[in-house]
């Protein structure tokens, strides 16, 4: 069984509020898309690196019903994803999921 740490302040964080506005969804829906992506990444992008993963796969992972570009642009604009010259990564992934990934490796 896997889990991921979600802080209680996520729903009121400025980045999340901005993400919800950019996506034209309620904050709770934006949280759902983020958490879906994070849970998917535990198994499919354990280093948090989304580089080379098809945008459609990321869209499906986040359970985003519209065009993937809208989601990715909003997540980069708000800082939930980092785009470093074409390298797309989940922001601070190692800080949040690193302990879980390390535990999986040890086991």
Image: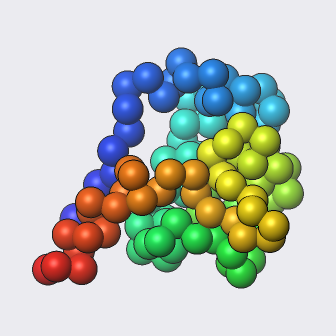
Q: Would residue 44 be found to the left or right of residue 69 on screen?
A: left
Q: Does residue 106 appear anywhere in the picture?
A: yes
**Residue at (80% x, 59% y) in the render:** 68
Vertical arrangement, residue 25 with respect to residue 53, above or below: above
Residue 49: % across, % down: 58, 71
Q: Would residue 54 be found to the left or right of residue 28 on screen?
A: right
**Residue at (54% x, 41% y) in the render:** 32
Q: Residue furthest left?
A: 107
**Residue at (63% x, 22% y) in the render:** 14
| Quarter that holds the N terminus | bottom left
Vertical arrangement, residue 31 with respect to residue 94, above or below: above
Q: Does residue 64 appear anywhere in the picture?
A: no
| Quarter that holds the C terminus | bottom left
- Count of numbered badges drawn on the protein: 0
Vertical arrangement, residue 53 with respect to residue 59, above or below: below
28 and 41: which is toward the camera:
41
Q: Would residue 70 be found to the left or right of residue 98 on screen?
A: right
Residue 48: % across, % down: 52, 66
Q: Residue furthest front?
A: 85
Q: How is the image coloured?
A: rainbow
Residue 101: % across, % down: 31, 69
**Residue at (68% x, 55% y) in the render:** 82
Vertical arrangement, residue 29 with respect to residue 51, above or below: above
83 and 32: which is toward the camera:
83
Residue 45: % across, % down: 51, 73
């Amino acid at each position: 069984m896997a889990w991921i740490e979600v802080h209680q302040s996520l729903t009121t964080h400025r980045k999340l509020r901005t993400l919800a506005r950019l996506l034209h969804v309620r904050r709770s829906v934006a949280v759902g898309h983020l958490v879906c992506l994070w849970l998917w990444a535990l198994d499919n992008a354990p280093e948090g690196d989304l580089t080379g993963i098809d945008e459609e796969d990321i869209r499906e992972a986040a359970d985003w019903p519209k065009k993937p570009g809208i989601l990715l642009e909003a997540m980069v604009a708000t800082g939930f994803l980092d785009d470093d010259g074409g390298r797309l990564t989940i922001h601070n992934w190692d800080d949040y999921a690193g302990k879980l990934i390390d535990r999986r490796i040890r086991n």
